Image (spheres, rainbow, N blue to C red):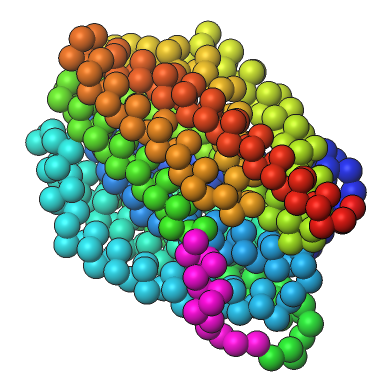
Amino acid sequence: MNKDLTVGKPASVLWSFCLPLLGSVVFQQLYNIADSLIAGKYSGVEALAAVGNSYEITLIYIAFAFGCNMGCSVIVAQLFGAKNYKDMKTAISTTFIFSLVVCLALTIIGLFLGAYMLRLINTPDNIFEDSKLYLDIYTGGLLFLFFYNISTGIFSALGDSKTPFILLAISSTANVIVDIIFVKELGWGVAGVAWATFICQGVSCISALIIVIKRIRNIKPGEKYKKFSFELLGKIIKIAVPSTLQQGFISVGNIIIQGIINGFGSDVVAGYSAAIKLNNMVITSITALGNGMSNFTAQNIGASKPKRIRKGHLAGLTMVCAFCIPVSLLYIFSGDAFIKLFMDTTSDYHNALNTGTQFLVIVAPFYLVVATKLISDGVLRGAGAMIRFMIATFTDLILRVVLAFILSKLFGATGIWMSWPVGWTVGTTISVLMYFTLIKKLEKKEVNDGTD
């Protein structure tokens, strides 16, 4: 069901729109958490370390898919808000064509350079083969990753957050079941984890594409539109490239940090792999709310209603408070219980457990800080203010990478975890300042234009 985000009370509209997005991300993260949890539980600490090690490289692929998602979503939302359905359809078709080319190029590069990338991050020898096996199978399914992400971006642009939630709930539950069958029952180990993700993500992608095509055809059916537009591609790329760079540089930064962590041995790698999955569930959930903020902002700018954006931003901050505070307390006081879920308790797992628990205790108190940043970033991206958006993002990333390197020399692995709160705090300060300068500019323009 398409939904106009430019009418109704902003807080109510955002809550209704974003809650299914939040649920979708929780189920999306079940893919990765199930992979690590089942690999570690039934195949041992080395399997857990292998999946977690490869995961950092897969984040580069996810960065490109996310960029295509956001580029399409923001432009389609603006056109939908302006009720320019002809160009909206052209923008969707253009994104699919462009993304297919990008996806095929990444697949070829990934299959040829996977081993090199794993060596580049100092992958320990005892987990190298399993890491490469997982990475190769994941790379083979990139087409599903890309087209599913673009489809969810289109749903969000049209104000529909419930359809992706339903699709993900089904496919993520299926992924857990198939993981258990492949790994526990058939004994396929890391390969079973990878193939389970490949199959379930493929089914989810195909289902999403079928629904998207039917949905678009029902908007002014029979209307002729161009299948590709360089003008619209330029607008999409203007959003997609900074979004890809944001996620890409974060991924590269995480890979550099993973390389530093790998120097401390497979126990630390395994503990970090478990903790970072729990951490990423929180960060990705908040990012989904930020993406919802982008769609809300884009539709209201398309409809020339910038005054609603400030109220929407406040509603977004209220949402992340309600989410972050209980999760932070849970991780701080019960983090070890969550980390144990990933461990084979019949083997020596205590070093890995201590590492993962320590990470959560240091990082979790700052979830509300980074949440404020991501909600503010959502407004910047939805308004197309990508230079402001990139400045805040890269400052955070560069600080975290540099500090991880320096502090690891002084405090060991503990120093690496300390870099997260510092980078988040500085990045948030910049994002909030950028948000206020933008919102004042938009509201001033509204007054000068004489609009309501």
In-image side of 261 versus 122 (left or right): right
**Quick check: 178 above or below 105?**
above
**Quick check: 71 above or below 315?**
below
In-image side of 144 versus 174 (left or right): left
Q: Position of residue 194 (x, y in %)?
A: 34, 51
Q: Position of residue 370 (x, y in %)?
A: 53, 27
State the residue in front, 25 or 423.
423
Which residue is situated farthest in the left direction here? 125
Q: What stretch of residues is rendered in magenta?
A: 225-238
Q: Going 46% across and 44% down the picture, which residue do you hit?
A: 390
Q: Going 49% across and 48% down the picture, which residue do you hit?
A: 387
**Quick check: 209 above or below 396?**
below
Residue 233 part of the magenta-drawn span: yes
Q: Going 65% across and 42% down the picture, which residue do you hit?
A: 438
Q: Going 35% across and 44% down the picture, which residue do you hit?
A: 249
State the residue in front, 175 or 262.
262
Can residue 405 be seen from the camera position used here? yes
Residue 432 part of the magenta-drawn span: no
